[in-house]
Amino acid sequence: MTQLLNKYQRDLALRGFAERTCEHYTANVRQFLAHYQLPVEELDSEKIKDYLYHLVSSQASDSKIRQAHGSLKYLFTQTLNRPWEVDSIPQRKKKRKLPSVLTVNEVFLLLDNCANLKHKAMLMAVYSAGLRVSEVVKLQLGDICRDKKRLLIRQAKGHRDRYTVLSDYCLKVLEEYWRQYRPQKWLFMGKDKASPLSTRACQHAFKIAKKNAGIEKEGGVHSLRHSFATHYLEIGGGIFQLQRFLGHRNLKTTLIYAHVQEENIVSRNPLDFFIHEKYS
């Protein structure tokens, strides 16, 4: 198993997958191999289907099942060079679910209840620039473009650089944070100051602020990114600009926030409107 996993990790690295993706894919393959404890030659398409069905039966999340499907497909088509084994295996459909979005008041309430200035500056950057948690912890001091009011996001999802908006107010908070904490390379450094803060620490900061603010809505720190996108459209921002700011390759991904915005619009029922016209 060890030799096969090493080859698999090599193939993932050659493809250029992100480190986190490599870790998740390798873990999925390791679980699959441990589930059967059989020589890899005996693992055919029926075994894969049975394993995926096992995940469904054990009530694994849809994202877990889709990720396992992708991991095993890459194993068989690339590392084992057996494409015919997986061609007939269906992919689980992705359920359409509107993202969790905070109201503007809830965002400010959350920011006002951060444990310290560092947490406030970090979570404000997530909201004001629509960042992923993996992006905010990797920000460097040189990524702040003060004159253009932009943030440079280096090697984000898909290994692409992009620029996103930088709020005037957020910039003031970041300046206050810099004067107090004096970060060197990484804007939000970890305990040793030579390394960036972990994503887990950022998620924990959000969880504390959310609890202190008394917000009971579902969703983690990523809901601040969802909130930025929704509020950006609500104040008249363009969908194509938003796509660039969020770093979406496909416009369909960005359009989900247009649906969220529509859900928040208080509209009049046509019957009520015309009844009022008829009897007024």
Image (tube, grey):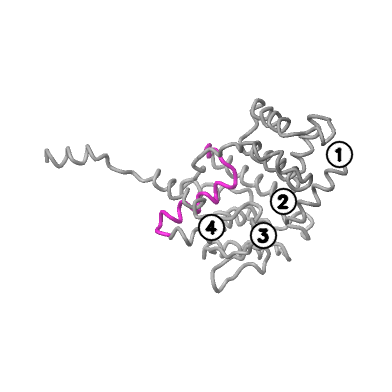
Amino acid type of the residue tagged 3 in the rendering: His
Q: Earlier in the sequence, mark 4 or mark 2?
A: 4
Q: Quadrant of the C terminus?
A: top left
N-term mark: 4 or 3: 4
Which marked residue is nearer to the observer: mark 3 or mark 1? 1
Q: Earlier in the sequence, mark 1 or mark 2?
A: 1
Which residue position is annotated with label 4?
A: 128
Q: Nearer the viewer, residue 249 or 134?
A: 249
Question: Which is more foreground, mark 1 or mark 2?
Answer: 1
Secondary structure category for the residue under label 4: helix
Cα separation between marks 4 and 3: 22 Å
Is-magenta flag for residue 219?
yes
Q: Nearer the viewer, residue 113 or 90?
A: 90
Q: Is residue 131 above or below residue 178?
A: above
Q: Amino acid at mark 2?
A: Ser
Tell me the distance, in whole angstroms, between the alpha carbons under discs 2 and 3. 19 Å
**Marker disc for residue 255:** none
Q: Is residue 147 magenta?
A: no
Comes first in the chain, label 1 or label 4: 1
SS at circle 3? loop
Neighbourhood count class around disc 4 (C-alpha, 10 Å): few under 14, some 14–19, many 20 upward: many
Residue at which label 3 appears = 159
What is the magenta range?
A: 215-237
The mark found on residue 198 in the picture is 2
Residue 203: x, y in percent? Answer: 65, 46
Label 3 neighbour load within 10 Å: few <14, some 14-19, many 20+: few
**C-alpha distance separating marks 4 and 2:** 20 Å
- Disc 4 marks a residue whose amino acid type is Ser
Q: Which mark is residue 1?
A: 1
